[in-house]
């Protein structure tokens, strides 16, 4: 379950922080499933890049405000499957850009490459 942060996200409300522990994420499917789990994606989430983008640009099941995804040890997937890593990161950044000017919600991603395996 995402945490509520007491900081304000561009006057949109509280910041919801979701933390994805990347130490065991070694495949595209594991990353997509993990993101869906930490952000409480609805049951219809299809665990593919299109569904990821769709859910990230909606997030209506979470409180209004900023939603921040912190993916620690993201370098693990990057080292194991750089193609999957690049595709997922591109989708995350595309979603970030899509909602950048929203008056209700803001999505941001923080990739942390704490370790490499």
Image (tube, grey):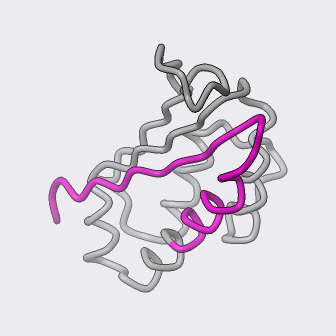
Pick whichever, 83 or 69, lies toward us.
69
Q: Is residue 96 magenta?
A: yes
Residue 49, placed above or below residue 95: below
Q: State the residue at coordinates (77%, 38%).
A: 103
Residue 55, placed above or below residue 27: above
Q: Position of residue 61 (x, y in %)?
A: 78, 31
For the magenta stretch, what is the residue range?
90-117
Quadrant containing the C terminus is bottom left
Residue 37, placed above or below residue 48: above
Q: Position of residue 17 (x, y in %)?
A: 49, 31
Q: Going by the picture, which residue comes out furthest to the top?
A: 6
Q: Going by the picture, which residue comes out furthest to the right?
A: 44
Pick whichever, 23 or 9, lies toward us.
9
Q: State the residue at coordinates (42%, 74%).
A: 85
Q: Is residue 70 left or right of residue 1?
A: left
To which quarter of the image does residue 9 belong? top right
Q: Position of residue 95 (x, y in %)?
A: 65, 61
Quadrant containing the N terminus is top right
Pick whichever, 104 or 76, lies toward us.
104
Q: State the residue at coordinates (15%, 58%).
A: 115
Q: Position of residue 18 (x, y in %)?
A: 49, 35
To which quarter of the image does residue 19 belong? top left
């Amino acid at each position: 379950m995402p945490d509520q942060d007491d900081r304000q996200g561009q006057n949109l409300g509280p910041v919801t922080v979701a933390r994805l522990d990347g130490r065991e994420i070694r495949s595209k499917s594991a990353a997509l499933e993990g993101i869906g789990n930490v952000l409480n994606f609805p049951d219809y989430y299809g665990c593919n890049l299109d569904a990821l983008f769709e859910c990230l640009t909606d997030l209506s099941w979470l409180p209004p405000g900023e939603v921040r995804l912190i993916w620690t040890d993201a370098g693990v997937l990057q080292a194991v499957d750089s193609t999957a890593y690049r595709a997922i990161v591109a989708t995350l950044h595309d979603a970030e850009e899509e909602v950048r000017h929203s008056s209700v919600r803001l999505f941001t991603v923080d990739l942390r490459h704490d370790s490499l395996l």
